[in-house]
Amino acid sequence: MSSCVGDGKPLRPAIAARDVPRIQTAAEATRAGTGVSFVTVMDPAGTRLSHPEPARIGETYQGTFLPAAGGATLVETFPGTLGLSVRAIVPATWPLAGSARM
């Protein structure tokens, strides 16, 4: 599931434009449609661009994200803002204007 979000075809224009309302809407639709507990989109610095608790958008992601920012996929168990969770963190796999990866 996370690889599909990382491929990001529906999210590409919103992420490229850093359109947080569109990113949040798409992430929540993905979450609701798949039954996962959360879908969080973040930038390479770890700033949340979506979160199931909208007040957390703009905060720094809690957990490991630097490997994904560098192009790797990782899975971890981490006690984040929503409690203990198993997370798959994947990079966006398509080029953005001005950067090789998101």
Image (tube, grey):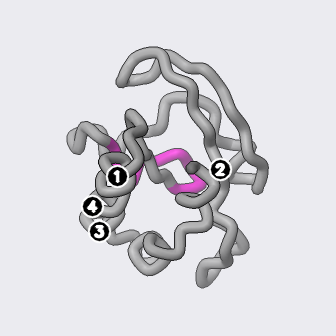
Residue range highlighted in magenta:
43-51
In the rendered structure, find residue 93 and report the number of the disc placed on it.
none
Q: Of label 2 and label 3, which has the lower sequence position?
A: 3
Between residues 65 and 2, which one lies in front from this camera angle?
2
| Marks 3 and 4 in Cβ contact (< 8 Å) | yes
Which is more N-terminal, label 2 or label 4? 4
Kindly report the distance in space between the C-alpha atoms of the residues bearing marks 4 and 2: 19 Å
Of the residues shown, which amino acid type is indicated by label 3?
Answer: Arg
Secondary structure under tag 1 reads helix
Q: Mark 4 or mark 1: which is in front?
A: 1
Under mark 4, the amino acid is Thr
Q: Report the residue marked by disc 1.
A: 33
Q: Which residue is mark 3?
A: 22
Crowd tier of the residue under label 3, counting other residues whose Cα lies within 10 Å: few below 14, some 14–19, many 20 or above: some
Q: Where does the image place residue 89, in percent across and percent down from the top left?
A: 62, 43
Please give the residue where the numbered disc 2 appears in the rendered image.
90
Location of mark 4 (residue): 25
- Left or right position of 93 against 54: right
